[in-house]
Amino acid sequence: MTQLYPTAAVLIIGDEVLSGRTQDTNLNTIARFLGALGIDLLEARTVGDRTEQIVEALNALRAVHDYVFTTGGIGPTHDDITADAVAAAFGVPLLEHPEAVAILERRYGDEFNAARRRMTRVPEGGTLIANPVTDAPGFQIGDVFVMAGVPKIMTAMLEDVAPRLRRGAVVHARTLRVSGVGEGAVADILTAAARAEREVSFGSYPFGHGSVGEIGTNLVLRGRDEARVEAASRGLLAVLGQAGIATETVKP
């Protein structure tokens, strides 16, 4: 794809996430990682440990985004089927990667058994993603990055992924926090501001939900042109002040 700004999607894989036994935090980590590189994360899906689901979701996502990041399902057990599914999605064989074999042979020595050997399988044409935590690598094939589900390992893998990505302009954000009024009290003001400045996105996020002393709204402005974001922020602050709505804090 050749869009002005790169786009990405995340595919979270694992029955344990869908069952509620495991709370996913990888999506938030990847979103922040991509945001710092100017890559727009536009979509995320979660699927179970079923080959057909993974293949269908992966092919749908990689057809419309520059990058797809998967997490989960690349361990040594029978239900770790992500590598198999990715190979099926690309229509290529799944082979033991010689470099991955060497890495895990060094790590495990005589304990390098058949289960651990499963973690050396990579779709033909794939390249390894370094894992500085446990050594068992992830892999990249095309613009798909296949990473571990364990948050600490996944986060460490991103260091090796970053240099491979095409970067875009970073999105700048400002948050105006107004207290004492609900979202409805600022809706018209926010709508008018959004219509006046099309290059900046405006979001409204209420907090407190009626609790005594806590009701309020966070107004978030986002855009790639920092000067326009700053100008829109100042303009919105002025209009809020004219309406008698106090803004407690302004933060990036």
Image (cartoon, rainbow, N blue to C red):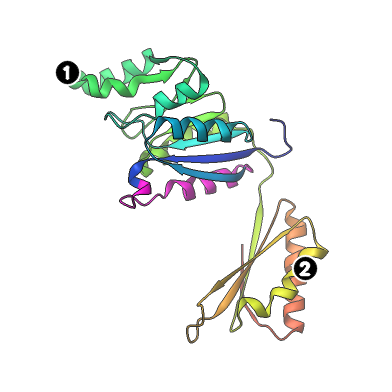
- In what element is the residue under mark 1? helix
Q: Residue furthest left?
A: 110
Taking the magenta stretch, the answer to whether it contains residue 124 is no
Q: List the residue tagged with mark 2.
A: 193
Amino acid identity at mark 2: Ala
x, y (%) of residue 136?
A: 33, 27
Mark drawn on residue 57:
none
- Nearer the observer: mark 2 or 1; the answer is 2
Picture quadrant of residue 112: top left
Q: List the residue tagged with mark 1.
A: 110
**Residue 147 visible to the viewer:** yes
**Residue visible at 45% across and 44% down in the picture:** 46
Instruction: Read off the magenta span.
Output: 17-39
For this view, does 240 lie left or right of residue 128?
right
x, y (%) of residue 7?
A: 63, 39
**Residue 138 visible to the viewer:** no
Amino acid identity at mark 1: Asp
Q: Mark 2 or mark 1: which comes first in sequence?
A: 1
**Residue visible at 48% across and 15% down in the picture:** 92
Front position in the image: 35 or 21: 21
Q: Residue furthest right?
A: 196
Taking the magenta stretch, the answer to whether it contains residue 19 is yes
Q: CA distance from mark 2 to mark 1?
A: 66 Å
For this view, does 129 lie left or right of residue 142?
left
For the residues bearing labels 2 and 1, Cβ distance under 8 angstroms: no
x, y (%) of residue 24?
A: 40, 49
- In what element is the residue under mark 2? helix
Which quarter of the figure is the N terminus placed in?
top right
From this view, report whether residue 85 is shown above or below residue 40: above
x, y (%) of residue 77?
A: 26, 30
